[in-house]
Structure formats: C-alpha cells, structure tokens
Amino acid sequence: MTRQQGGKPSLLVTRRLPGAVEARLASVFDVTLNRDDTAMSPAALAAAMTRHDALCPTITDRIDARLLHMPGRTVRVIANFGAGTEHIDLDAARAAGIVVTNTPDALTDSTADLAMLLILMAMRRAGEGERALRRGDWGGWRPTHMLGQALAGKMLGLIGFGRIAQAVAVRARGFGMQVSYYNRSGKVARAGPADDARHMPSLAALAEQADVLSLHVPGGAGTRHLVDAPLLARMKPGAVLINTARGSVVDEAALAEALRSGRLGSAGLDVYEREPAVSAALLALENVVLLPHLGSATLETRTAMGMQAATNLEAFFAGVEPPHRLC
C-alpha cells in the first residue's frame, strides 16, 4: 500500500476525524480511515508501519521504539493529531530518521475555555448541584444552600506558562482574578497579553499562595506526579486543583485523599492517569468535576487540528519543511 511510481502517498489515519479533514486528506493521499473509531491494537499499528508511507495518530496510539525500528518499516513521517507527543518516542523516531510533527496552535483557545469552565464548576459546586437536582434532592432555594466561592479577588496559580496558560490568564483576569505562575525554565514572561502575571520563584511558593492551581505542563517522565501528596499538603485549605494538561502530572491517589479529607476544597479534571479508566476513589467524591478529555473538543478546533496535520503531511511529501516539525 506504499506509494507507487507517480501515485499518491499512502496514509493511515488511526481515528475518525472531522469530515472536512478526512475529505482533504482523501484528495491528496491514498488514505485508509478507521471507520469504527476504536483504538488500534499494537499488532494493527505494527502492520501499518510496513504498509504505509505516513501515519496520522492520536494520543490513544502508543508509537514506541519497537514500532519505529521494526524491520520492513515504510512509514517516513508521523503527523500527530494533537499537540502532546508523549505517546511517541521522539528519540527513537529521530534515530530512525522519521519526521514527526504535531498541531500546537489550534487547541489553545478551546482548552483555555475548558480550564475556565472547570474553575467555575469547581468553585461554584455546579457539578454537585446538577447531580443533586437530577436525583430529586433539591428542595428549593435557601440562603445557605451549596455555597461556593467567588472568583473575583482570588489568586489563580498557573503551573507552566505557555500558550494555553497565558490564554487562561487572560480569561481569569476577566473574572477579576489575580494571576501568578511558575515555569520550569525559570524564564519570566515579558511579552503577550498576559505579561503582567506575577512570576513565582518556586512551585512550592505558588502552591502555598494559590486559591486555584491550574496545570499547563506536558506529560512524560519529567512531570509525572509533579503534583503529589507533599505539594497538595502545601496548598491552602479549601483550594482548588484544575488539570487540563495530562493525567500523569497528578498523583490521583493523593488527590483523592486530599479531597476526601477536606484538605482541598474541590478539583476539576479533564485528564486522567489511566485513560479511559477513572479512579474509583475520584468517582466516589462529590467535590470533584470529572470531564471526559474535552479540552479541544469543539468542531472548530478539531477541524483546525486536522488541517494542521494535513498541512504538515503535504509539506513533507512536497519536499518542504513541515511547519510544525518536532524531529
């Protein structure tokens, strides 16, 4: 199924994409689509690596060194659908001479919107209230029923200060929040619409002062359980944790205990350590909002992500440097 002389490059797309994206890819490539939209098995991915010129995977596909270095591999470019690439062994791809690209810009606004949604839901107990109403447990309005927290005047602490975090900062200021951040590079941001956010000298200092702590760092070994029991213990009593980054960044067992004990006020999560499985300890709690990885889930954003992946692929096969090349 690889490209014949004068033919179209062969491309496998591992999950269903918006219709406009699939149509564009089909117009340029000899494309194989995943019609049933289930995660491909390791065996199916291995077979694809020897049958196609290009691969368009998502976060549900583990592209490890074994796949990238397998005998008979024909895939020369991997155009990831998404910004995060911890599911792809970039070092192994680089060693194998395989080009890898991603879609870093398209999902900034939608993910920032979702972070603010989680902040609002967690602080105003919206998930808890909605569940109570559906159960028939609402007896009518009363002055002290389900009191939450106001956003105005509260301090939002951002762990990481890239595109998404800065977009969250802009939104939070619109709700009257103060904004501080910590980034691992230690660089102080002095450009862009969020450049008045306060840089904190350490992660511990940020955790100790934030009313809401929101995570905006990549996944991978370097950030695994960055938010652990000791860091959670440093947070203010009643503080809120928000995660729209990667599930592996949070020790979910420690988080569940902090929420169960009342040490933390609430949390809002869109990502999990063992997706799609969600910790039973978290599911049992009322003071946590749980969403099914919806950060980029708008038609506009998912279409834009697919179009970026298509642009990367088209550039590669035209002999031009892909605009979002990682290796």
Image: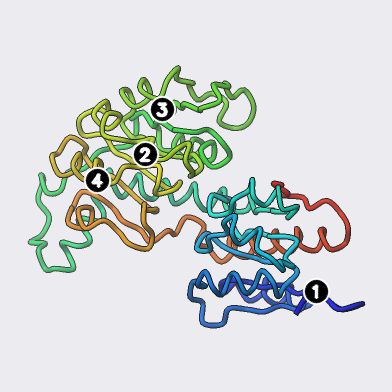
Q: How far is mark 2 from mark 1, CA to CA?
A: 42 Å
Asked if the residue at tag 1 contacts the one at tag 2, i.e. Cβ–Cβ closer than 8 Å, the answer is no
Picture coordinates of residue 198, whole percent (x, y): 48, 21
Q: Which residue is mark 4?
A: 253
* Residue type marked 1: Val
N-term-proximal mark, 3 vs 2: 3
Residue 178's mark?
Answer: 3
Q: For mark 2, what is the residue?
A: 225
Quadrant hosting residue 284: bottom left
Amino acid at circle 4: Ala
Q: Give the number of the mark in front: 3 or 4.
A: 4
Q: Residue at x 27, y 29 (%)?
A: 230
Along the polypeptide, which appears first: circle 3 or circle 4? 3
Left or right: 49 as drawn, with respect to 185: right
Query: Identity of the amino acid at label 2?
Result: His
Q: Furthest-right residue in view?
A: 6
Label placed on residue 28: 1
